[in-house]
Image (spheres, rainbow, N blue to C red):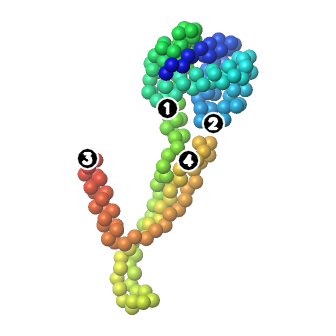
Amino acid sequence: LCHSMNALNFLLNASSKTVVEKIVSLTFVARHSSRELVLQNIVSLLKISESDAKSLFDELLICINTSLVSGDVEDVASLLKENGASVNPKLKQLIGQIISNKLDSWKEASSQNRISLPRLVDFNWALQVTKSSNKVASMSIPSVQMSMQIENEHSNIESMPEVSNVVFEISAESVQTIIEGLGKIREQLS
């Protein structure tokens, strides 16, 4: 990263450490959504221009993402040492402390709000034996009817995902193949 972190110095305009912490927290919250409201807050709190607020937001986001990706606040310290030579040393320390204090809760929030694959919520099954049909008077064909509740992918981190029901029927041979496949997977994982 060859990006200068000079815009972080705009945080020196904050009236207190609490304001700096609020701006860092708002940046984390808005990292995947609309930034307009946060930028307006930054402009209002620090009395800076919107372009300066955007630069500050972007640089704070780099610090936050660096810590989230690595899971270590020391990487933010290294980033600021390499790219933030003109950033006030006490401000660097304060940013590091804020990120360090919030990192665990941010990692937890990030993992819970991560866009994910569909998830099995519940399932029910029933064994059925077809005894006859309109074409054959007597037969005995076993099958399994599955009913699964699937939590669909999160499309929006601010709402609960939809749960849909999936119902299907499979033959006894297919069930056997699935069981054998799962056994092989278990062996490979052991």
Where residue 12 sits, quadrant-wise, is top right
- The type of residue carrying mark 4 is His
Q: Are marks 3 and 4 in contact (CB under 8 Å)?
A: no
> Which of the two labelled residues, at mark 3 and mark 2, occupies the earlier sequence position?
2
In this rendering, the label closer to the viewer, 3 or 2: 2
Q: Measure the C-alpha gap from mark 2 to mark 4.
A: 14 Å
Residue 35 tag number? none
Q: Measure the C-alpha gap from mark 1 to mark 2.
A: 17 Å
Residue 173: % across, % down:
32, 71
Please give the name of the residue rendered at 57% of the width and 26% of the height, measured from the top-left corner: 61
175 horizontally vs 29: left or right: left
Where residue 55 sits, quadrant-wise, is top right
Q: Image height check: is 88 above or below 40?
A: above
Q: Measure the C-alpha gap from mark 3 to mark 2.
A: 41 Å
Residue denoted by label 3: 190
> Which of the two labelled residues, at mark 3 and mark 4, occupies the earlier sequence position?
4
Residue 163: % across, % down:
55, 56
Residue denoted by label 1: 107
> Which of the two labelled residues, at mark 1 and mark 3, occupies the earlier sequence position?
1
Q: Are marks 2 and 4 in contact (CB under 8 Å)?
A: no
Please give the name of the residue rendered at 28% of the width and 47% of the height, measured from the top-left corner: 189
Q: Secondary structure at mark 3?
A: loop
- The type of residue carrying mark 3 is Ser
Tell me if I can see residue 105 in this picture: no
Q: Measure the C-alpha gap from mark 4 to mark 1.
A: 18 Å
> Which of the two labelled residues, at mark 4 and mark 1, occupies the earlier sequence position?
1
Residue denoted by label 4: 154
> Which of the two labelled residues, at mark 1 and mark 2, occupies the earlier sequence position?
2
Residue denoted by label 2: 33
Q: Are marks 1 and 2 in contact (CB under 8 Å)?
A: no
Q: Secondary structure at mark 1?
A: helix
Q: Nearer the viewer, residue 74 or 6?
A: 6
